[in-house]
Image (cartoon, rainbow, N blue to C red):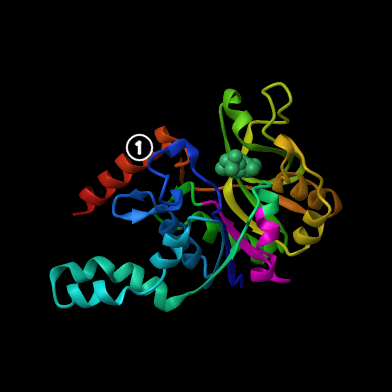
Amino acid sequence: MIQKCLFPAAGYGTRFLPATKAMPKEMLPVGTKPLIQYGVEEAMEAGMRNMAFVTGRGKRALEDHFDLNYELEHQIQGSSKEKLLEEIRHLIESCSFSYTRQNEMKGLGHAILTGYPLIGNEPFGVVLADDLCYNEEEGVLSQMAKLYEKHQCSIVAVMEVDPDQVHKYGVVAGEEIEPGLVRVSNMVEKPTKEQAPSNLAVIGRYILTPGIFEILRSTEPGFNGEIQLTDAILAQARSGKVLAYRFKGERYDCGSIEGFVKATTEFYARITDAD
Ligand code: G1P
């Protein structure tokens, strides 16, 4: 069973300025819940209980969100508002939360490596909270955790994208070993349409085996001069086995205004339909 989930959350969220000037982008709400809470709920559904965050300056609101607020709780005690805090209280009671800071922005690979002291030598999940995933029956990370039980190797979640969009993603190629499951033989970070080995794009859900840390320690800067997780996973695929999994569900790119608005509209429709 995978116990830990890592949340890289040090990025500035410049695309959402000025909203993100004094507030972490992970705290942007879809409905009444901040993006990061959806990610933590998905990890919890997958059986993970230790939530590890790689944060940076200006991210204190994340720590406060996953902590009790006695004054507020006292104020609303016994009122109809109390039930609005039920879900977050349940998360706080069920999980542990730990934090470390990334003080230089050197890419996603560097962020993951910064999380090593919180993870140690065990397999772990990774959630990029910008990517909001929804699947009614079973969350994406839970689907992946089950696959991990069977295959015991690193797994990346992928989806088909329009060839004009491949430059926004890590893109994988390999052999399909069973429907929806590809054994990765190539992986390129943000290729041009011409360089892309396929149109299978990685989204922000990973299960990684701890060997990734050793690889990241010697990974040279790649695309954009940053240490890329994609390059480290490719090295892992070359020396062993890495799977790409075509997940079931919907993914919203909440790192873009368009994706964020789409998520807001569709989540709101689901809430009101359920009422
Ligand atoms: C990161 C990864 C990329 C992946 C993407 C998914 O890029 O580097 O491989 O496809 O997340 O959202 P970012 O969106 O942080 O630029």
Query: Closer to the camera, 256 or 99?
Result: 99
Instruction: Name the residue type under label 1.
Output: Val
Q: Is residue 150 at least partly visible in the picture?
A: yes
Quadrant holding the C terminus: bottom left
Q: Which residue is under mark 1?
A: 261
- Give me the residue at 57% from left, 64% from top: 5
Q: Is residue 202 at least partly visible in the picture?
A: no
82 vs 217, left or right, is left
- Give me the residue at 86% from left, 53% from top: 239
Q: Quadrant of residue 92?
A: bottom left
Boundaries of the magenta span: 111-128
Q: Quadrant of ligand 1?
A: top right
- Give me the residue at 40% from left, 32% from top: 258
54 vs 133, left or right, is right
Query: Closer to the camera, 71 or 84?
Result: 71
Q: Is residue 8 above or below residue 198?
A: below
x and y percent of residue 224 in the render? 70, 35
Q: Quadrant of residue 4?
A: bottom right
x and y percent of residue 35 in the render? 41, 52
x and y percent of residue 154 in the render? 70, 57
